[in-house]
Image (tube, rainbow, N blue to C red):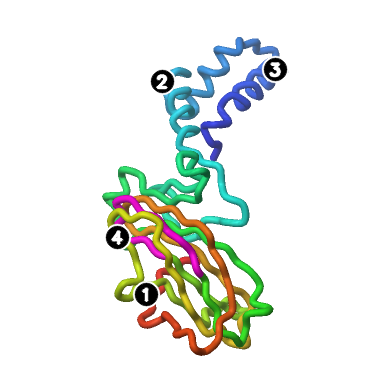
């Protein structure tokens, strides 16, 4: 399925193809034909949709990617230009119709070498606006992608709800010796908006308590 942002190149290609068959059409006529292919009554209607979609697009942060279980229809994500290009997750207006299980999540993945067999802490700062629930998370997988260790702060005092200024959060997990990869990130559950910054991953000694208590595994990866 073609994206509507490709409508103008499609119109150019269509005009060229028709001319090759000795069917001359003007540029404006080819735009009108493409508009009808997208179910719009005319080019002006499609053009308005293209503008709206482009305004909804955000530049993506380097080395971060949206997780495969994110509900792409109901969330907007990327670098927020109004917040010095801080990575952001936010629900769209119709996300209020989602079940409470709907969420969006950004993540990074690295090899576990240097961390396996050790106690590891991931630290970050998050900021929220009218968020149903916002948090950070970390997971360790083996070579077969089986989850070995996981925490997403779904225990008392671990998540943020409502509106909060920058707040530090950290997760501490024991990473099994057979861990192959580490994954960490931040997620927004249901509705609202959140930003994240300053993720740091470090080894700690056994005097630092693990944070994991109850694990609400939401298939974040």
- Mark 2 = which residue? 41
Tell me if mark 1 has few (under 14), some (14-19) or many (20+) residues whose alpha carbon lies within 10 angstroms of its own. few
How far apart in space, not on screen, are marks 4 and 3 (Cα)?
61 Å
Residue 216's disc number = 1
Which residue is disc 4 drawn over?
161
Sequence-wise, the earlier of marks 1 and 4 is 4
Compute the Cα span from label 1 to label 2.
47 Å
Q: Residue at x 52, y 89 (%)?
A: 206
> Up-down: is 30 above or below 145?
above
Please give the range of residues in magenta. Answer: 123-135
Q: Main secondary structure of the magenta part?
A: strand
Q: Residues within 10 Å of mark 3 (few under 14, many from 20)?
A: few
Classed neighbour count for the residue bearing mark 4: other residues with Cα under 10 Å, few (<14), some (14–19), many (≥20): some
* Residue at position x 46%, y 66% in the image: 220
Identify the residue position indicated by label 3 in the image.
21
Expressed as whole percent of the image width and height from the top left, the position of residue 107 reads: 53, 62
Secondary structure, mark 4, is strand
Q: Which quadrant holds residue 26?
A: top right
Q: Is residue 42 above or below residue 82?
A: above
| Residue 180 image point, x, y percent | 64, 78
Residue 209 pos. (x, y %): 45, 85
Left or right of 106, for residue 215:
left
In this view of the protein, which residue sits in the foreground, 45 or 125? 125
Instruction: Decide whether residue 128 is among the magenta residues.
Output: yes
């Amino acid at each position: 399925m073609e994206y509507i942002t490709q409508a103008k190149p499609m119109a150019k290609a269509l005009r060229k193809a028709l001319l090759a068959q000795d069917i001359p059409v003007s540029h404006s006529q080819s735009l009108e034909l493409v508009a009808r292919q997208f179910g719009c009554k005319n080019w002006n209607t499609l053009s308005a949709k293209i503008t709206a979609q482009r305004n909804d697009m955000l530049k993506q942060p380097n080395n971060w990617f949206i997780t495969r279980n994110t509900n792409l229809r109901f969330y907007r994500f990327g670098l927020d230009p109004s917040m010095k290009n801080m990575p952001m997750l936010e629900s769209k207006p119709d996300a209020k119709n989602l079940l409470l299980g709907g969420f969006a999540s950004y993540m990074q993945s690295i090899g576990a070498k240097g961390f396996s067999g050790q106690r590891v802490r991931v630290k970050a700062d998050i900021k929220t606006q009218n968020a149903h629930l916002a948090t950070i998370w970390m997971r360790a997988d083996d070579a077969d992608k089986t989850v070995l260790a996981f925490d997403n702060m779904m225990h008392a005092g671990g998540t943020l709800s409502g509106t909060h200024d920058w707040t530090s959060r950290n997760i501490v997990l024991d990473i099994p010796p057979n861990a192959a990869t580490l994954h960490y990130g931040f997620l927004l559950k249901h509705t609202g908006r959140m930003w994240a910054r300053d993720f740091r991953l470090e080894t700690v000694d056994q005097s630092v308590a693990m944070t994991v208590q109850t694990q609400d595994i939401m298939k974040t990866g």
